[in-house]
Amino acid sequence: MNFIRTEIDGLIIIEPKVFDDARGYFFESYRRDLFAQNGITDEFVQDNYSSSRKGVLRGLHFQIAPKAQAKLLRVTRGSVFDVAVDLREGSGTFGKHFGLILSAENKKMFYIPKGFAHGFCVLEEGTEFFYKCSDYYSPAHERGIIWNDPQLAIPWPVLDREFILSDKDGKYPKLGDVAWSPGPGAQGANLRQKVP
């Protein structure tokens, strides 16, 4: 596997070594020892799988401490534009994003540590998205930032249709409308929506 560091510290693209022949192909999608050697030491405890129509936009999601999640993402069918936003208080890249195409064809994986919001836009019909999480889903700790926040300026792809969002995803606050409380913010632990 090839582990590629991005311009935002902590975000890693993983390119598997693919063995391809007349029968099809094979690759290792996860190997704990290789991941640990490359700085990914999370214990993944939950796998999630989603199927989405072209134009579906999910995000930007994260969980706060003590249920913050690191994620290991890949697409098994179709393609997405995938985005991570740095929410680590005190980070030199706070509020910055990194995006890339994940597809069944390129077989790339994307590691997002704790302290980031995550979202993706589906580029093909019937896209199937698979990801591992380092903690369990917890509705009480679930938070989000609106996908089209001008401060984030994420260059979402232009499609031949409008984006399809859940009601919840369409109502998240902007980054500037969340408050930070004192504490171990290095993991994005204390981000919360401002209370009017």
Image: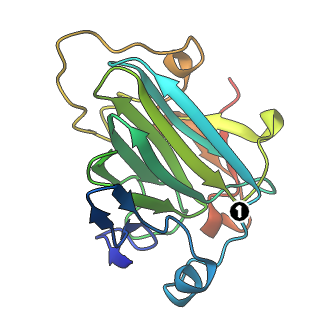
The image position of residue 150, as x and y in percent, is 30, 32
Residue tagged by mark 1?
A: 44
Q: Amino acid at mark 1?
A: Phe
Q: Residue at (57%, 11%) from the top-left corner?
A: 167
Screen quadrant of the N terminus: bottom left
Q: Outermost residue toward the front? A: 22
Q: Is residue 98 left or right of residue 48?
A: left
Colouring method of the image: rainbow
- Tell me the element at label 1: loop
Residue 182 placed where, x, y %?
Answer: 72, 61
- Please state the horizontal and vertical placement of residue 66, each as a whole percent of the image: 81, 57
When asked about the image quadrant of residue 27, the answer is bottom left
In this picture, is 194 found above or below 98?
A: above
In terms of depth relative to the viewer, which is nearer, 175 or 36? 36
Residue in the picture at 71% in, 55% down:
68
Question: Residue 104 placed where, x, y %?
Answer: 34, 45
Q: Quadrant of the C terminus?
A: top right
Q: Is residue 112 above or below residue 137?
A: below
- In the picture provided, is 195 more to the left or to the right than 23? right
